[in-house]
Image (tube, rainbow, N blue to C red):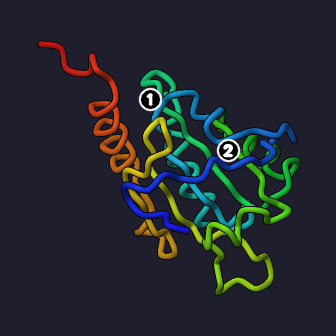
Amino acid sequence: MDLQVGARFPDLDLPDHTGRERRLSEVAGGDPMMLLFSRGWWCPKEQTHLREMCRLQEEFEVAYARLVVVSVDEPQVQSAFRSGLGARFTFLSDHERRWLPRLDLLEESDTLHEPYRPTAFSLLPDLEIHRRYDGFWYWGRPTAEDARQDMRSISRRVRDDFERP
């Protein structure tokens, strides 16, 4: 699947952390989005990175942007992890691994958990890929400042009234 800049990201249909089936476009709700594919709750790198993203959640909320995490953790596990992080944003569960093979984002070095390779995408409201981050190595993941810059750039592009004369 083509998951490069300029391509449209698939409109995933997965249960959220409450078990409710959701579509990615519904979660986006017409706003820009930072979509984070995570190994899972058990990975210390994920815990560190998602704590950083939690510190951004208030900015995302007031700026009409979304943060979304996808992992192979079951919804009840995601719910506990989300709560422990203090996250208010959506977690989507691909515990049945319906999308993992189609997206070609398998973390091949982990044969025990068969998780997603840590990958992040900043998306326009129509799910067009603005930027892709490969987070296999921790420093490849988007920082808070990367996320801010991506959301600013996307907002400038899609919000007609972003810069008023």
Identify whether 32 is placed above or below 63. below
Q: Are marks 1 and 2 in contact (CB under 8 Å)?
A: no
Q: To which residue does mark 1 refer?
A: 59
Q: Where is mark 2, residue-wise?
A: 85
Q: With 71 as the anchor, is 6 left or right in this view?
A: left
Using residue 15 as the reference point, say whether residue 62 is left or right of it: left
Q: Residues within 10 Å of mark 2 (few under 14, many from 20)?
A: some
Q: CA distance from mark 1 to mark 2?
A: 17 Å
Residue at figure coordinates x 46%, y 21% from the top left:
62
Q: Quadrant of the N terminus?
A: bottom right
Badge number at residue 16? none
> In the current view of this chain or complex, which residue is farthest to the top?
165
Badge 2 element: helix
Front position in the image: 4 or 56: 4
Residue 154 found in image quarter: top left
Give the number of marks: 2
Q: Secondary structure at mark 1?
A: helix
82 or 98, which lies in front?
98
Apparent side of residue 33 relative to residue 131 in the rendered image (left or right): right
Q: Is residue 24 above or below residue 4?
A: above
